[in-house]
Amino acid sequence: MPETDSPLVLALPKGRILKAAAPLLHMAGIVPGPDFNDDKSRLLRFETNDPGIDVVRVRSFDVATFVAFGGAQIGICGADVLMEFDYPEIYAPLDLGIGGCRISIARPKDRSGQEDNPNRLSQVRVATKYPSLTRRHFAARGINAAIVHLHGAMELAPVLDLSHLIVDLVDTGSTLRANGLEETQTIAHITSRLIVNRTALKTQPERISAIINRFRAALAKEHEA
């Protein structure tokens, strides 16, 4: 962990969650430097208006790892990532209510027979970027999930006979429909959480708690608006 006089590091996810989190960060009084919003900038770590806080911008799937291993003390992370990695080093005190979506099982619309109904199979091949979460879900139902681990273009897997099913994040479902797939089950509804490293919370309780309280106050303001 950094020395207590060093800035705390807040890990932020790139993409849509970062856009959704921007107003909340502002209400919490955390404003990154000008380079943070410059798409041409190659910087990954940025100072903020608060000398006690720096922010880093990383892949959404990496936020939890940065916080779990102490590279960052605080982060904003989707519940899907927390479910996948299940790091014991992470404490998630606040549901920020942003980045709402769901993790769902989907299959081609034209396959509705018994051979493609996972509830009637002992084994099924599933394409996903959530191997651990997917195995746990199917194992709890007595089904062995053979995982095809992909990081994108999930919808192609069943169409090209790479898998029977997919497990993926779904927002509107338009991408599924455009590729001839349909949702068959929702595994979990997802929002983004404020997460902290448990060791940092123990060693720097006042500093970490103060930031948590700033986000809690920002959420309260948002709900009042």
Image: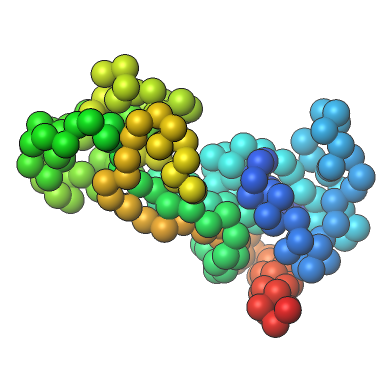
Q: Is residue 115 above or below residue 65?
A: above
Q: Write down the quadrant of residue 15 in the picture.
A: top right
Q: Is residue 73 visible?
A: no
Q: Residue at x 66, y 78 (%)?
A: 223
Is residue 42 among what the camera can see? yes
Q: Is residue 90 left or right of residue 223?
A: left
Quadrant the C terminus occupies: bottom right
- Say above or below: 207 vs 60: below
Give coordinates of residue 101: x percent, y percent: 48, 53
Against 218, residue 126 (above or below) is: above
Residue at 68% across / 55% down in the picture?
20
Say how many tags the image has. 0
Residue at 87 percent of width and 60 percent of height: 50
Locate residue 31, reporting x and y percent.
Answer: 85, 57
- In this image, 80 relative to 68: left or right? left
211 or 179: nearer the eye?
179
Along the line of sight, the residue nearer the viewer: 6 or 93: 93
Location of residue 159 in the rendering, given as x and y in whole percent from the top left corner: 32, 22
Residue 78 point in image, percent of width and height: 53, 52
Q: Which of the two residues, 97 or 43, is positioned nearer the viewer here?
A: 97
